[in-house]
Image (tube, rainbow, N blue to C red):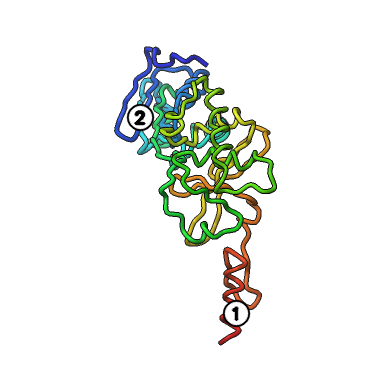
């Protein structure tokens, strides 16, 4: 894949406050996937994407009767809603592979049954920027997460909650304490600096910016860890994976809440639900089920 895709004379770039678009016109169908992947792979942070097609129709009865439709999300989009990209692997798994499996002609609008597709000649990529960097140590963690015994919330992470999770996961000690792993966090950060070719300094350590979800790809390669990221719906307790690693490394699970990363000790237990045998109520923890049983018994 060529890194200088913007030098293509058939290419147009548009930049907005929270989104950008990339337009290719007069392209060959065989070039579509390479150009699409080129654009998506250059993104530095997590994003959402959709693609609109530009195409030409021709009358089934009159070859001189043609109509051109400009790439427009209102009527020529490939996906019903923007696709969330949280890792480099998502680009191929959620976008490229899905589009390859589609019959693109079925995605187009036809003014009447008297027209057929002549050619798809353009496409416009719409990229929506997102703010999903992990590092906010000031986030207020709700009780349902804070008191969950399957989750560790490290105190005073100063934008380095991801490194706290890594340090905890890799530190082999039966007496390790979440409040006393600063030395291991610093060593993990030094290793990351070395991997990136950046000289470590205490000022860099203290001023480090949060890590975006899309940057976790290189963090995985640095530490040889597959990082799965989950989110929890506080109201229901439902836990959903928003980023899954496919790299084959040893897995580490973290919970993202308000841009803060917490370490998941046991994802299977965190995702468990407990149902009351005497009713239809479902609880997100065994403790809440026991409390309800005690209250019911006292009535």
| Residue 50 shows in the view | no
- The reply to whether residue 60 is in sight is yes
Q: Tag 2 or tag 1, which sits nearer the N-term?
A: 2
Which dot marks residue 294? 1
Residue at horizontal 49 percent and vertical 56 percent from the top: 233
Which image quadrant for residue 204?
top left
Secondary-structure class at tag 1: helix
Image position, residue 53 (x, y; %): 42, 29
Residue that mark 2 sits on: 20
How packed mark 2 is, by other alpha carbons closer than 10 Å (few <14, some 14-19, many 20 or more), is some
**Left or right: where 131 falls relative to 229:** left
Q: Quadrant of the C terminus?
A: bottom right
Query: In front: 263, or 57?
Result: 263
- In front here: 66 or 88? 88
Q: CA distance from mark 1 to mark 2?
A: 56 Å
Q: Position of residue 154 (x, y in %)?
A: 52, 48
Residue 70 lies, in percent from the top left, at 34, 28
Between 236 and 15, the one lying in front of the other is 236
Secondary structure under the numbered disc 2 in the rendered image:
strand
**Front residue (pair 53, 158):** 158
Check the image and report above or below for 258 versus 15. Answer: below
């Amino acid at each position: 894949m060529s890194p200088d895709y913007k030098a293509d004379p058939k290419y147009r770039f548009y930049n907005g406050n929270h989104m950008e678009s990339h337009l290719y016109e007069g392209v060959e169908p065989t070039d579509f996937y390479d150009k699409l992947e080129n654009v998506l792979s250059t993104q530095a942070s997590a994003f959402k994407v959709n693609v609109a097609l530009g195409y030409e129709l021709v009358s089934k009865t009159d070859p001189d009767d043609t109509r051109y439709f400009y790439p427009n999300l209102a009527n020529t989009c490939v996906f019903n809603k923007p696709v969330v990209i949280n890792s480099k692997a998502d680009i191929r798994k959620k976008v490229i592979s899905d589009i390859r499996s589609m019959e693109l002609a079925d995605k187009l609008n036809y003014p009447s049954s008297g027209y057929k597709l002549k050619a798809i000649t353009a496409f416009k990529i719409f990229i929506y920027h997102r703010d999903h960097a992990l590092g906010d140590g000031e986030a207020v963690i709700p009780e349902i997460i804070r008191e969950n015994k399957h989750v560790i919330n490290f105190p005073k992470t100063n934008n380095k909650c991801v490194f706290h999770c890594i340090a905890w996961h890799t530190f082999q000690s039966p007496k390790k304490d979440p409040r006393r792993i600063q030395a291991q966090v610093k060593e993990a950060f030094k290793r990351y600096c070395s991997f990136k070719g950046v000289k470590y300094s205490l000022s860099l350590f203290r001023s480090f910016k949060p890590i975006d979800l899309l940057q976790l790809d290189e963090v995985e390669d640095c530490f040889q860890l597959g990082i799965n990221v989950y989110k929890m719906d506080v109201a229901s307790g439902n836990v959903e994976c928003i980023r899954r690693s496919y790299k084959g490394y040893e897995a580490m699970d973290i919970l993202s809440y308000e841009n803060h990363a917490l370490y998941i000790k046991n994802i299977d237990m965190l995702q468990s639900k407990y149902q009351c045998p005497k009713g239809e109520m479902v609880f997100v923890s065994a403790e809440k089920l026991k409390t309800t049983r005690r209250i019911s018994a006292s009535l």
